[in-house]
Image (tube, rainbow, N blue to C red):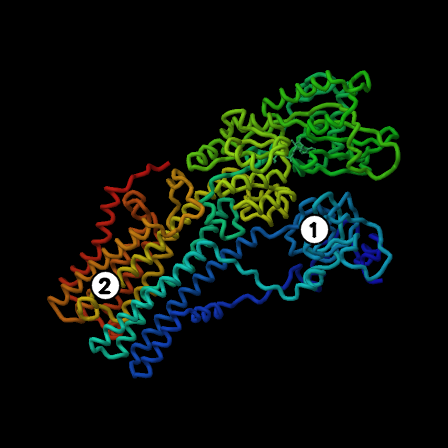
Amino acid sequence: MNNFYNKTADEALKAINVTSGGLSSDQVNKRREVHGYNELIEGRKKTAFQVFFEQFKDFLVIILIAAALISAFLGKFESTVVILVVVIVNSILGTVQHLKAEQSLNSLKALSSPNAKVLRNGEKIEIPSRELIIGDIMYLDAGDYISADARIIESHSLQVNESSLTGESEGVNKITEVIKEENVAIGDRKNMVFSGSFVTYGRGIVLVTDIGMNTEVGKIANLLETAKERKTPLQIGLDSFGKKLAIIILAISAVIFGLNIFRGEPIIDAFMFAVSLAVAAIPEALSSIVTVVLALGTQKMAKENAIVRKLHAVESLGSISIICSDKTGTLTQNKMTVQKVFVDGKIIDHDELDHNTEIEKQLVLMSLLCNDAVTIENREIGDPTEIALVNLGEIYGLDELKIRKEYGRLQELPFDSDRKLMSTMHKISGKNLMITKGALDVLLDRSVKVENSKGIASLTEEIKEKIQHTNIEFSKNGLRVLAFAFKEIDENRKLELEDEKDLTFVGLIAMIDPPRVESTEAVENCIKAGIKPIMITGDHKITASAIAKQIGILKNQSEAMEGYELDSITDEELKNKVENISVYARVSPEHKIRIVRAWQEKGNVVAMTGDGVNDAPALKQADIGIAMGITGTEVAKDAASMVLTDDNFSTIVKAISHGRSIYENIRNSIKFLLSGNTAGILSVLYASIWALPVPFAPVHLLFINLVTDSLPAIAIGLEPHNPNIMQEKPRGADSPILDKAFNLEVVFEGLLIALVTMIAFHMGLKTADTITASTMAFSTLCLARLLHGFNCRSKESILRVGVFSNKYLWFAVILGYFLLILVLNFRPIMGIFEVTTLNFNQYSIVYGLSFMPLLLVQVYKLIFVKYTKEV
Ligand code: ATP
C-alpha cells in the first residue's frame, strides 16, 4: 500500500519520517536537494536573443529588410548598411523595452505569489509556497490556497474546493480516517488535499506528501504554457487603430511612389522612398510603448502599497466612479480595544469588571475560550476582534493559553461572515458546553434564556428589549458589539450548525475600532475626484453609520441599508435605489455582487474590496477587484486585480490617481509619436504636390522614426505624477483615447512642425543646393520633433509643471540631439546620410525654426489653458 490515503495519519507521519515538531532546517535542506522546489515547470522562458529576433517578425521590419536586400542587389551597399543598422538599433531598443517590462511584471508576480503556514523546528512560520517540501506539516484555514498534495492529520469542519482538479464546484468535506479501498479516484480521497484547490470552510493540519510536478495537478499539467499577459483594452484599441492607419499610409506611399516614377525618378529610389515614408508614418511602436509605460507605472504603484495583478487594471483605474469598500481594517484601523461590557443587566467599563462576581468572570472566560487569537511575547496573532478579547483577559490576569488548556476545546464551528457566528465546545464542570459568540441580531434570535447573577431565566421580551437597546447605544458610539451565549449539549456527538439555537444569552462585549486617520482625507479626495465611496460591512448598521459619518461617507441616515432589506428588493429595485445608498450593513458576501452589478448597469466602473474566501465572486464581478494584502485570504488575492499591501482605503485613492496619470502619460506619448509622424507625412506630401525635390533621404525618416523619436516617447510616458489629476471627473468607461480634441491637436501640431520644416527646406533651396536644403529640412524635422516632446508632457505649459521635472525627457532629447550632431558632422556617417556641412547662418535657421513649435505651443498653453492650482 503505497498510497497515503490508505495509511493512517500516524503511519503517514512515520513513512515520511516527521516528528510532531515538524521538519528541522537540516532535514529541509537535505530534502530540497532530493526533491527540489515546489513548482510546476513552466514552458521555457524566452531568452533575450529570442526576443531580439522576434522583433524581426514585424511587418514593417520585413519590408525594410526586403528594401535592404533590393538595395544590395542593385549595388547600393550604403543604403543596405544604413537600413540594417537602423533596423538593428530599433530591435535592440525594442528588446530592452520588452525585457524591462517583463522584469517589472515578474517582480510584481513575485510580490503576490502565495504563502503557506508550516511547522518547522517546532515553530509555526509562514513561507512562500514554493519552499514547501515533502514532510512539512502545513496549517490550512478558510481562504488558503493549497499548493502541495497532503494527507490530512487534523480536520475541523475542513471543506475544500477541488474544482480545478475534479470539475466539482461544491466544497468537499475532508476527514482524517484511513480509506481502505485502493485505486480510489481523486475526488473520493477525502483524507487528502491536493495542490490547486482551496479551503472554503473550517481549518485543518496536513502532512505534505508530494510537491511540484509529482502532485496530481503536476501530473496532468505536463509543461505549463508560460502564462501570457493578455493585451489590455487600450492596446487592443491601439492595435486596431494602428492597422487602419497603416492601410491608409501604405496607400499614400503607393501614390507618392507613382508620382515619383511619373517624374522620372529611378524605380529603386522611388521604392526606397515609399518604403521609408511608410515606416516613418506608421506608428508601430504604439502598443509596445503602452506595455512599457504600464509596466513601469505598476512598479511605482507597488512602492506605494498597491500591487497590480492584472495589467488592464491600471487603465481601468482612471475610469473608476464607485469604490465599494469594507469597513473593518480598510476604513478603520482594525486595532480593536474593548470599551464596555454588558452583563447581568448592567453596563460596565472594560476595566471595572469585578472578578469576584461569578457571571462577570464567566463572560471573560467564555470570550477567551471561543477564540483563536493568541498573544505570545507581545506578538498578537489572529483576528483583531479576538485579540481585543485576549487583551481584556490580560487586564484580569487571565492567560488565554492556560485557560484553553484547562478547558480543552472538543469541537468547533468556525466563524464565517455569512453566518456571523462562531461556536466551540468544551468540557466544563463535567458538562459539554457549547459557547457561541457573534453578531447580536443573529444570536439573540437564537436565544431562549438569559443568565444573570441569580441564575438562568427565560428571555422575556422586556429583557430582549433592554439588550437590544444597550446594543444600539453601544453602536451609536461606533462600537463593534459581540454577543455571547452558551448551551449544554448532552450527548457526545458531532456539533452541527443546527446546534446554534435555543441558546442562553450571557452578555455583550463592545470594542472600539477607530477610523484610520487618513480615511477622512481620502474620502474627501474621492468625492472631489467625482468618485463615490461606499461602505459595505458585515457590522451592525448603527456602528457602520457612526463610523461612516465620522469619515464623511454618510451624510444622511437614510443612506444606510441592511442586508435583509437587500434581500427583500429585486435587482431592478436595487438599481433604482442604489444611487442613494452609501452604507450597506450586515451584508453577506453575496450581497456584494448585487451591489456591484446594480452600479455597473448604471454605467459605472466599480472597484470593490474584499478579503474572505466568499468575497472572490464579487471581486471577479467588479471592474477592479481589490484584495487586502495583510488580512486577505489567498483566494481573495487570486481573484483580485489589485492587492493592497497595507489594507488601507487611502491607498486605493492613491492608486486611482496613479492610474489616471499613467493613462494621461500614455495619451501624451501617443500624441508625441502621431504628431511627429504627421509632420513627416505632410512635409513629403507638400513637396510631392508642389513638385519640389524630395526633401528627405529615406534614411532620414528611418533615423527619426526608429531612433531619435522612441526614447522621448517613453520618457513622456514616465512623466511625474500630476497632482491635479484628482480634481477632474473620472474618464468615461468607453470614451476613446483618441478623441476629437486629441486628433485635432495631433494634426495641428503636426502641421506646425511640417510648416517649419518646409520653411527650412525652402530657405535652403533658395540660398544653396538641394543637398543643403535637404540637410536643413532633416535637421529641423528631427530637432523640432525632439523639442516637441516638451509640448507633449502635459496639458499645461512646462513653466507651470516644472521645466526640469521630467529628467528622462531631458536625457532623451539631449541624446537625440547628440546623435543628430554626430550625423551632421561625422564624416563617415555624413556620406551615408546624404547630408552636407551647414554654415553658421544655416544652423541658426535650423535652430530658430526648430524652437518655433515649442515656443508657439507653450505660449498658447500659458494663455489659453486653465491653470489648475496644485492641491
Ligand atoms: P467588514 O465587512 O467591513 O470587514 P466586519 O469585519 O464587521 O466588517 P465580518 O467579519 O463579516 O465583517 O463580521 C460580521 C459580524 O460578525 C461582526 O459585526 C461581528 O458581530 C461578528 N464577528 C466578527 N468576527 C467574529 C468572530 N471572530 N467571532 C464571532 N463573531 C464575529
Regarding residue 853, the answer to whether it shows in the image is yes
91 or 266, which lies in front?
Answer: 266
Q: Quadrant of residue 458?
A: top right
Q: What's the residue type where badge 1 is placed?
A: Ser
Q: Is residue 634 left or right of residue 855?
A: right
In the rendered image, residue 294, in percent from the top left (x then y), is placed at: 45, 53
In the depicted view, which residue is nearer to us: 169 or 69? 169
Nearer the observer, 294 or 469: 469
Which amino acid, mark 2?
Ser
Q: Where residue 732 sits: x, y (%)? A: 42, 44
Q: Position of residue 209 (x, y in %)?
A: 75, 57
Which numbered mark, 1 or 2, is in the foreground of this view?
Answer: 1
Question: Disc 2 designates what residue?
Answer: 683
Location of mark 1 (residue): 169
Question: What residue do we see at 61% from left, 45% from top?
Answer: 617
Q: From the viewer's perspective, is residue 487 above or below residue 776?
A: above
Element type at marker 1?
A: loop
Helix, strand or loop status at disc 2: helix
Residue name at image x 79 percent, y 52 percent: 190
Q: Earlier in the sequence, mark 1 or mark 2?
A: 1
Marks 1 and 2, Cα distance to the nearest angstrom? 63 Å
Q: Residues within 10 Å of mark 2 (few under 14, many from 20)?
A: many
Q: Quadrant of residue 166?
A: bottom right
List x then y, in percent, for residue 863: 23, 42
